[in-house]
Every structure is written in structure tokens, then in C-alpha cells.
Image: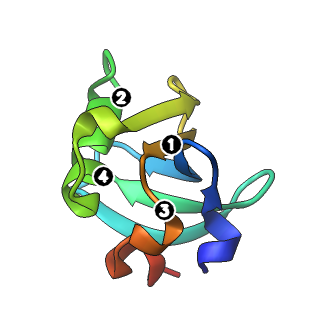
């Protein structure tokens, strides 16, 4: 799955996310077919009001990846369910099994 979702760049790892705000719990939900590539589907409890869902997404990824929130950047899709995220100073090999095993 890693080759379908994650891309290694000079700055770190990028991947596309389809976010589901207003869920009962924060969780990885699998993969979905996006417009250009596979997307990691992630549910967050927060609503998409005033950036709350984006903040919850960054907090969730930070916890799962065991990295600082400052290392996680939403590159595109700040007001969309479809987002591209950069995890700075990370390698694909560093991605935990909880993410790479989702399908």
C-alpha cells in the first residue's frame, strides 16, 4: 500500500487524505479512490467549523506518527475534505504499521 499512497520528497512524506469530520471517534478508516490517487480516509470527531477538523486531523496524525504537530502541514485542501499533507523530516519507512496496514 505504501507505494500507492505515500510519496517521498526532499522535505518528508506526502500523502492524500479524505477526511470525515463529525465522526464518533478519531480513526483511520481505510483507503478510498481519490481523483488522482489513493487517499487515506481518516475520521475525526471535530466539526469543520473554523478549522477545528483540520486541527483535530493534525493532532491525530501527530499522536499516531509520534511527531510534533509542527512537523505536519496541510499543503492543500484546507477548506476541503480532500487534503494533501506533508510530514516533515519523515521517511516512508518511518510510517507506523497502523497507517501502512490500512486498506
- The residue where tag 2 is placed is 48
Residue drawn at 56 percent across, 70 percent down = 31
Q: Which SS class for mark 2?
A: loop
- The residue where tag 4 is placed is 61
Where does residue 52 sit, x and y in percent of width and height? 26, 27
Residue drawn at 24 percent across, 51 percent down = 67
Label 2: few (<14), some or many (≥20) within 10 Å?
some
Residue 91 disc label: 3
**Quarter-wise, where is residue 63 in the image?**
bottom left
Label 1, label 3: how many angstroms apart (C-alpha)? 11 Å
Label 4, label 2: how many angstroms apart (C-alpha)? 17 Å
Residue drawn at 44 percent across, 84 percent down = 101
| Mark found first going from the N terminus, 1 or 2 | 2
Residue mark closest to the camera, 4 vs 3: 3
Q: Are the residues at dot 1 and dot 3 in contact (C-beta closer than 8 Å)?
A: no
Residue situated furthest top in the rendering: 50
Q: Is residue 45 visible?
A: no
Label 2, label 3: how many angstroms apart (C-alpha)? 29 Å
Where does residue 98 sit, x and y in percent of width and height? 33, 77
| Mark found first going from the N terminus, 1 or 4 | 4
- The residue where tag 1 is placed is 86
Residue mark closest to the camera, 2 vs 3: 3
Label 4, label 3: how many angstroms apart (C-alpha)? 15 Å
Label 3: few (<14), some or many (≥20) within 10 Å?
some
| Mark found first going from the N terminus, 2 or 3 | 2
| Mark found first going from the N terminus, 4 or 2 | 2
Label 1, label 4: how many angstroms apart (C-alpha)? 11 Å
The image shows residue 68, relative to residue 95, as above or below, that is above
Residue drawn at 45 percent across, 47 percent down = 19
Where does residue 76 sit, x and y in percent of width and height? 60, 29
Amino acid at each position: 500500500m505504501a507505494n500507492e499512497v505515500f510519496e517521498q520528497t526532499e522535505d518528508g512524506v506526502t500523502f492524500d487524505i479524505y477526511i470525515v469530520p463529525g465522526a464518533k471517534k478519531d480513526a483511520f478508516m481505510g483507503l478510498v479512490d481519490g481523483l488522482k490517487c489513493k487517499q487515506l480516509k481518516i475520521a475525526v470527531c471535530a466539526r469543520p467549523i473554523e478549522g477545528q477538523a483540520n486541527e483535530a486531523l493534525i493532532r491525530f496524525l501527530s499522536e499516531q506518527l509520534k511527531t510534533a504537530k509542527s512537523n505536519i502541514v496541510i499543503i492543500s485542501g484546507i477548506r476541503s475534505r480532500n487534503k494533501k499533507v506533508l510530514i516533515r523530516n519523515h521517511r516512508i519507512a518511518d510510517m507506523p504499521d497502523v497507517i501502512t496496514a490500512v486498506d
